[in-house]
Image (cartoon, grey):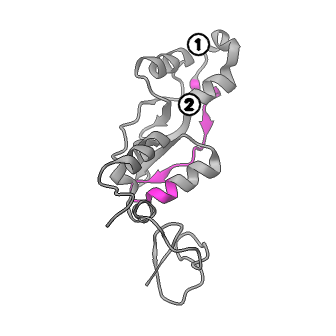
Amino acid sequence: MTLCAQCGCDNLAGEDTCAECHQPLSAKKHRSFVERSLLRDPIRALDPSLPVCVGPRTPVSHVLDLLVTRRIGCVLIAEHGHLLGIFTERDAVKRLGAEFRSYLNQPISFFMSTRPEALEIDDKIAFAVHRMDLGGYRHVPILDEGRISGVISVRDILRYIAEDRLEINPA
């Protein structure tokens, strides 16, 4: 078996590309315990936070209040457990801006990012890092069989890397 350096998937020996992520299997070998852990461990190991979810008709004022009072960076917009969008601190600044007061009674669906990139709970952590880097995301919704189950942030991944059980220089 050949382990994919990008997603950690086991592939048949002799294959040129990964069956899961279609990346070349000739990529560099993993050099550190941290790299191997990120490629091996699923997002589930990050213990994703329970997301704060609201409906698409929720007023902007309520969503902003949730971000502040709960000290969170994003709110998921969902209906019947299905992800419709995400509203983040960055959206508040870029989409509402200084004129935010005039939008307070508007539904959050007017300002949310639609069709956010979500990952499944058993996807590898390395895939989350890759997705966050490519998309410039700080938060990614996590699904379990297509239903919302959590949310992860860059901070969750950094905390995971810094945990004592990840020895940077294993003996």
Residue at numbered disc 2: 88
Q: Is residue 13 above or below residue 17?
A: below
Q: Mark 2 falls on what kind of element?
A: strand
Most extreme residue toward the left, as rendered? Answer: 165
Residue 86 image point, x, y percent: 55, 35
Q: Is residue 3 above or below residue 162?
A: below
Left or right, 55 with respect to 135, comes to left
Whether residue 110 appears in magenta in the rendering, the answer is yes
Q: First in sequence, mark 1 or 2: give its number.
A: 2
- For the residue pair 86 and 33, the one nearer the viewer reads as 33
Assess whether mark 2 and mark 1 are in contact (beta carbons under 8 angstroms). Answer: no
Left or right, 151 with respect to 22, comes to left
Residue at numbered disc 1: 105
- For the residue pair 60 and 32, the one nearer the viewer reads as 32
**Residue shown at the point (61%, 39%) measured from the top left:** 114
Residue 130 image point, x, y percent: 56, 56
Quarter of the view holding residue 158: top left
Mark 2 residue crowding within 10 angstroms, few (<14) / some (14–19) / many (20+): many
Whether residue 70 appears in magenta in the rendering, the answer is no
Quarter of the image with the N terminus is bottom left
**Residue shown at the point (51%, 58%) measured from the top left:** 127
Residue range of the region highlighted in magenta in the rendering: 108-128
